[in-house]
Image (tube, rainbow, N blue to C red):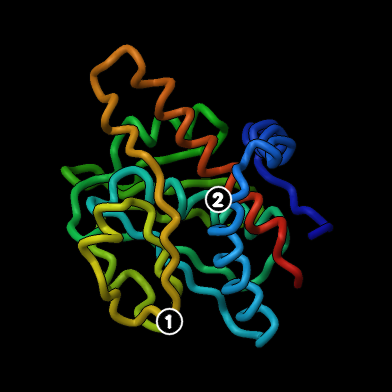
Amino acid sequence: MSNKTTLLPSLSPTVERLTHEFDQIPAERKEVLSQLVRFIESKVEAGQKVYLNFICTHNSRRSHLSQIWAQTAAHYYNIPNVICFSGGTEATAFNPRAVKAMRQEGFSIKMREEGDNPTYEIHFAESAEPVIAFSKKYDDPFNYSKDFAAVMTCSHADENCPLVSGATARIALTYDDPKNFDGTPQEASKYTERVNEIGREILFAFSQVSA
């Protein structure tokens, strides 16, 4: 895709760096990502909206990171009518460590509602609506409920959620959980690593969409 769209000045350097790291993505991951590319292309070619629901067990880390990056990538590569959601097999909260890691990479994140399960606004561009993020089940009324791709971002959810009601495609794009390093000296670096890995792969997928 050409005609890239402007992002926040704080985020642009991260995206520029990640788009020059596509050669770091293993071939087997690119094959999985091609499933996402094909789903997006099929909807774009049909003139339909592209609904993506990124699903993980607790909707606390990887599913949110993937949702935000996907909405950002769709804007960046100027792919219209892409609407991204996230959910879990249960609701917890968008983990503050993941929020912090996304802020450090250049996203502008504001808390809209406090509480045990806060609601955040995530801004990636001045010209785009923010992503509204809070933890919820994948079939929460906030999410679109039919003709969407269920993108499974953790193996636990993929294995324990054999049927995602309303999904017309299912893609197992799983990532290691940075939660495994909570409270360790590697905590911050592992969250940053995961934010960058997800960003790199999602940006690559959207860069491959012909529209």
Residue, far front: 28
Q: Of residues 63 and 8, which is closer to you in this image?
A: 63
Residue occupying image coordinates x 23% and y 46%: 93
Q: Of residues 162 and 18, which is closer to you in this image?
A: 162
Above or below residue 185? Residue 37 is: below
Give coordinates of residue 77: x percent, y percent. 72, 57
Give coordinates of residue 27: x percent, y percent. 62, 48
- Amino acid tagged 2: Arg
**Disc 1 crowd, CA 10 A, few/some/many (<14, 14-19, 20+):** few
Which label was assigned to residue 29? Answer: 2
Q: Which of disc 2 and disc 1 is earlier in sequence?
A: 2
Q: Of residues 189 and 49, which is closer to you in this image?
A: 189
Q: How many marks?
A: 2
Which label was assigned to residue 168? Answer: 1
- Amino acid tagged 1: Thr
Give coordinates of residue 209: x percent, y percent. 70, 65
Give coordinates of residue 46: x percent, y percent. 66, 87
Query: Does 87 sit left or right of 5 as displayed?
Result: left
